[in-house]
Image: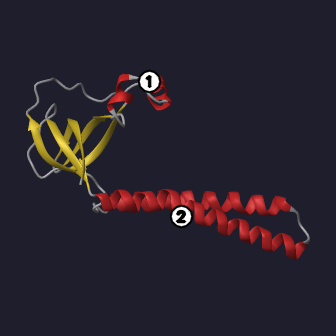
């Protein structure tokens, strides 16, 4: 289980919106030294992300919680995001090559086929991701535990 600390922002029955801070890969990156990744990360700053998670415990805005996502969900999600567009890019290139060789066309058809195949892969992966989130599947993060009750006031999200 991949775990991340978060702060509860809003509560809606068994779903809560939490805010997480982007964590750096290592202590050297967090201090801004070492490799170029730490320097590149400092350009973008410590941004936060708001996501909706499922909660089985009673929570209030401001509570600090630990959210989790199974490793298998991350692996399958990565396959959908990276592998499906890549495979469709290759398939589109092969179709473009076949069309180009049969019609006497040039490499432009191969390039166009690859681009169209890759775009189709991204669209398919995005649609698959939305369908999985709406079903309340294991691809959705869950609240594992409350670390401490909220001691800060949380401002409502901007309209």
Expressed as whole percent of the image width and height from the top left, the position of residue 31 reads 35, 23
Q: For the residue labelled by badge 2, is the local secondary structure a helix, a strand or a loop? A: helix
Q: Quadrant of residue 151?
A: top left
Q: Which corner quadrant holds the C terminus?
A: top left
Please identify the residue farthest to the right as the structure is shown.
104
- Foreground disc of the pair 1, 2: 1
- Residue 40: percent from left, percent from top: 49, 28
Where 79 falls versus 38 (above or below)? below
Q: Residue at x 59, y 66 (%)?
A: 87
Residue drawn at (16%, 40%) of the image: 65
Residue 113 placement: quadrant: bottom right
Local packing at callout 2 (Cα closer than 10 Å; few below 14, some 14-19, many 20+) is some
Residue at image point 55% right, 58% down? 123
Q: Which residue is mark 1?
A: 42
The quadrant where residue 133 appears = bottom left
Q: Quadrant for the N terminus, please.
A: bottom left
Instruction: Report x, y in % for residue 33.
Output: 42, 23
Q: Residues within 10 Å of mark 1 (few under 14, many from 20)?
A: some
Q: Is residue 106 visible?
A: yes
Front position in the image: 7 or 78 = 78
Q: How many marks?
A: 2
Residue 9 appears anywhere in the view: no
Q: Which residue is mark 2?
A: 84
Q: What residue appears at the point 14 percent right and 23 percent down from the top-left corner? A: 152
Distance, label 1 to label 2, CA atoms, is: 32 Å
Label ID, residue 7: none
Residue 13: percent from left, percent from top: 16, 48
Residue 95 as seen in the image, left or right of residue 119:
right
Q: Secondary structure at mark 1?
A: helix
The answer to whether residue 145 is above or below residue 32 is: below
């Amino acid at each position: 289980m991949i775990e991340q600390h978060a702060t509860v922002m809003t509560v809606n029955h068994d779903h809560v919106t939490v805010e997480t801070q982007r964590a750096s890969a290592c202590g050297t990156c967090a201090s801004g030294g070492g490799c170029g990744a730490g320097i590149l990360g400092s350009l973008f700053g410590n941004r936060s992300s708001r996501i909706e998670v499922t909660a089985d415990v009673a929570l209030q805005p401001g509570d600090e919680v630990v959210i989790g996502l199974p490793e298998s969900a991350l692996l399958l999600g990565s396959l959908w995001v990276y592998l499906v567009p890549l495979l469709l890019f290759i398939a589109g290139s092969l179709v473009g090559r076949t069309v180009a060789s049969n019609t006497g066309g040039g490499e432009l058809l191969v390039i166009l086929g690859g681009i169209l195949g890759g775009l189709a892969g991204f669209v398919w992966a995005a649609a698959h991701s939305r369908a999985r989130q709406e079903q309340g599947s294991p691809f959705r993060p869950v609240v594992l535990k409350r670390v401490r009750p909220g001691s800060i006031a949380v401002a409502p999200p901007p309209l």
